[in-house]
Image (cartoon, rainbow, N blue to C red):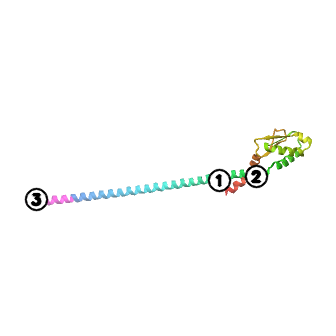
Amino acid sequence: MTEEIKDLITKIKNEGIKAAQDKSIQIELQAQALAEKIIRDSKAAAEKIISDAQREAEQYRSSTEALLKQSGRDMLLSLKKEIVAMLGMIIKKNIRTFLTPEEMLKIINLLIKASARKEDIVVTVKKEDLKKIQGGLLSELSEEMKKRVILKPSDEISSGFTISYDAGKSLFDFSEEALAAYISAYLKPELNEILKD
């Protein structure tokens, strides 16, 4: 009987060890599967983080590049605007320098003498230039022409003059502003070509 109990104990012991070994193998397989899943999930998460970071870096680079291009364009436009304004000031200064009352008198005399029309000729100048023009102009014109010439002062003209051959219905504008606009319009394409490069 003792032998049977011993065999029974040995059998229980062997079965317990085998069950424990089976359980241990099962736990080890589960742990291995779980470890592999954790590694796979970690790799996937790491790849997603890297992918997201690369995408964000590319977006940031693109955004920065676009911002730099826009800033460059804005700076060039601002510079071009400044250059055009400076060019306008230079043109106006030169017009004022060269279009003195004496020079205007010569030009107005030529324009009046070249006119074949019989209507009144209206010449408008800056108030300060009126007396200088009046004295010189009237002294060089014939009596008939003097009667047809009307000199008018203007607060709107800072330099230069306007002339009308049809008693003021239409006019030719030789004022500083009109001449500056004409010269600027002529120079702007040249300036644009220079700035384009």
Q: Which mark is residue 79?
A: 1
Q: Amino acid at mark 2?
A: Asn
Residue at (57% x, 54% y) in the render: 68
Residue 126 against residue 63 in the figure, above or below: above
Task: Give whichever of 126, 23 is nearer the camera.
Answer: 126
Q: Secondary structure at mark 3?
A: helix
Asked if residue 142 lies in the magenta stretch, the reply is no
Q: Earlier in the sequence, mark 1 or mark 2?
A: 1
Q: Amino acid at mark 1?
A: Leu
Asked if residue 11 lies in the magenta stretch, the reply is yes
Answer with left or right where residue 16 lies relative to residue 140.
left
Q: Secondary structure at mark 2?
A: helix
Could you say where residue 18 lies in the image, as x and y percent from the top left? 21, 59
* Residue matched to label 2: 94
Give the main secondary structure, helix, strand or loop, of the magenta stretch.
helix
Dot 2 crowding, Cα within 10 Å, few <14, some 14–19, many 20+: few
Mark 1 or 3: in front is 1
Mark 1 or 2: in front is 2
Magenta region = 1-18
Could you say where residue 114 lies in the image, as x and y percent from the top left? 88, 46
Could you say where residue 54 lies in the image, as x and y percent from the top left? 48, 56
Point out the image quarter for the N terminus: bottom left
Q: Earlier in the sequence, mark 1 or mark 3?
A: 3
Q: Secondary structure at mark 1?
A: helix
Residue at (10% x, 59% y) in the render: 5
* Residue matched to label 3: 5
Real-space CA distance between mark 2 and mark 3, rounded to the nearest whole angstrom: 129 Å
Q: Are marks 2 and 3 in contact (CB under 8 Å)?
A: no
Residue at (43% x, 57% y) in the render: 47
Q: Are marks 1 and 2 in contact (CB under 8 Å)?
A: no
